[in-house]
Amino acid sequence: MRIFQLSNPDKSYNCFLNVVIQTLWRLNGFKLLLYELLEIKDGDKKDICKSLGELFNEILTNSSGTPQTFSVDKLRVKLY
């Protein structure tokens, strides 16, 4: 199991978003579907899916043995 942290700077109120991201990360079926959607080359990708996929890739490719903290800022911007 990959252990990671998501940033939650003071007064950013990312905690609810972080719970959703961590839940989606644990759902292998969701990750597979997300990566399939991102492979579609028709230009119809949603920015939110792309940002979430990029965050998942950052987490997946982290080779550090210690928990790393990842920013959700790009995803949060796309949600607004």
Image (cartoon, helix red, strand yellow):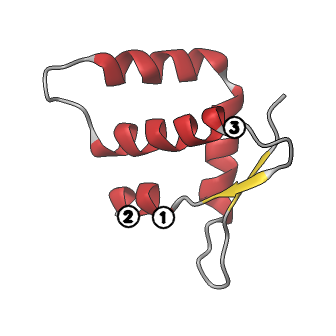
Element at badge 1?
Answer: helix
Element at badge 2?
Answer: helix
Q: Residue at x 61, y 44 (%)?
A: 21
Which of the pair 4/19 is nearer the observer?
4
> Mark 3 is on which residue type?
Thr
> Mark 2 is on which residue type?
Val
Inter-mark Cα distance, 1 to 3: 18 Å
Q: In the picture shown, does residue 73 fall above or below 61?
A: below
Circle 1 packing at 10 Å, graded few (<14), some (14-19), many (20+), is: some
Quadrant holding the C terminus: bottom left
Residue 14 lies in what quarter of the image?
bottom right
Inter-mark Cα distance, 2 to 3: 20 Å
Which residue bears the numbered disc 1?
A: 73
Give the percent coordinates (x, y) of residue 24: 62, 34
Which residue bears the numbered disc 2?
A: 77
Element at badge 3?
Answer: helix
Mark closest to the chain's N terminus, 1 or 3: 3
Which residue bears the numbered disc 3?
A: 23
Residue 65 lies in what quarter of the image?
top right
Circle 3 packing at 10 Å, graded few (<14), some (14-19), many (20+), is: few
Give the percent coordinates (x, y) of residue 18: 65, 55
Whether tag 1 and tag 2 are in contact, CB under 8 A, the answer is yes
Inter-mark Cα distance, 1 to 2: 6 Å
Mark closest to the chain's N terminus, 2 or 3: 3
> Furthest-left residue in view?
42
> Mark 1 is on which residue type?
Asp
